[in-house]
Image (cartoon, rainbow, N blue to C red):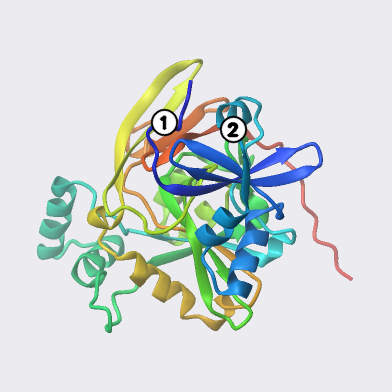
Amino acid sequence: MSYYHWEESLKLIQFKVVEGRKVGLIDGDTARHVQGVTTILDLANLAVAEGRTLAECASDKAGDTLDLDALRQKGQLLAPIGHDDPAHCIVTGTGLTHLGSAEGRDKMHKAASAGEATDSMRMFLMGVEGGKPAEDKEGAQPEWFYKGDGSIIVGPDQPLSSPSFALDGSEEPEIAGIYLIGPDGTPHRLGYTLANEFSDHITERGNYLWLAHSKLRHAALGAELLLGDLPEDIRGSSKIIRDGKTLWEKPFLTGEANMSHSLANLEAHHFKYPLFRRPGDLHIHFFGTATLSFADGIETKEGDIFEISAPPFAIPLRNALEVEKAEKVTVKAL
């Protein structure tokens, strides 16, 4: 089965081979090997140094054709970005960024008018009112969280590990932006990827001040790095498969047409901090979602498979849930 016949966007992939890693460029129905580099990060550093785009550099180096179906079937596709030193890959995200359903928004507005708004509702409404400012204006700050470093990232068809102490491990179908900080401290957006942010929603629900704990989990990135602009209206599907059967499935919406914040506003509030503009660092930033199986009462269990798909990404992101073994950590005094 081909996953690629209807795609026209330029995208990059990374895949593993016996000798290490390679990069591919997807252009419509055709995928070609990008020669002379072994990672997308190498290609991005080259593009920054030469003052060119990723698309230009990849196109110039594109050579032999690739069989994407074979790469997928053999499990060779990798997450589209990574850093040899995971500590220099910073993984973060923003929440309460999506409009959700009209009914949900109406309930929030009515609750706020009645003086019953929670902190989350207030922040959501701040985004609705000021999350898409004019180009020369500062917009409302979004909810922001730290998720981890590059060690938490897994690629397509790799397991998503939930800690033994977690109360829940559930999907969050999202788009993530990938950024490289240039030698002069300028953030460069490499592109966008399909993602599963994966969180502990029971912990988060217990007390909103536990949000920080609930987010310190693994996350999965889809195989494709979309170059250029993100479509304003993305309509995807999120599902959970258990024992070979679909347990839960629901559409999800993303892209700026379905968000209370512009991507530029989310980027501005992240990169305004100097510590996030350290030359050579990678940033993976999750833009949020409005669709969760947890909200529909689904309780996940080990072995469940999360599947997220959404055009313009042609390859679904699939990951099985696994639970880590408990370990005892002892702090030693020196």
In this view of the protein, which residue sits in the foreground, 270 or 209?
270
- Where residue 160 appears, x then y in whole percent? 59, 38
- For marks 2 and 1, the one nearer the N-term is 1
Q: Is residue 207 visible?
A: yes
Q: Which mark is residue 300?
A: none
- Are discs 2 and 1 less than 8 Å apart at CB? no
Q: Determine whether the residue tagged by mark 2 lies in a helix, strand or loop.
A: loop
The amino acid beneath tag 2 is: Asp
Q: CA distance from mark 2 to mark 1?
A: 21 Å
Position of residue 86 measured from the top left corner of the image (x, y, whole percent):
70, 59
Tally of numbered discs: 2
Which quarter of the figure is the C terminus placed in?
Answer: bottom right
Decide: few, some or many residues near mark 1? Use Cα within 10 Å; few <14, some 14-19, many ≥20.
few
Q: Which mark is residue 5?
A: 1
Vertical arrangement, residue 297 with respect to residue 53, above or below:
above
Image coords of residue 110 (percent x, y): 10, 57
Residue 208 quadrant: bottom left
In the rendered view, does 334 fall on the left or right side of 56?
A: right
From the image, state whether disc 2 or disc 1 is nearer to you.
1
The residue nearer to you, when weighing 323 against 193, is 193
Residue that appears at 17% across and 53% down: 105
Name the amino acid type tagged 1: His
Disc number placed over residue 157 in the picture, else none: 2
Q: Residue at x 51, y 58 (%)?
A: 55
Frontmost residue, 24 versus 261: 24
Q: Residue at x 52, y 26 (%)?
A: 304
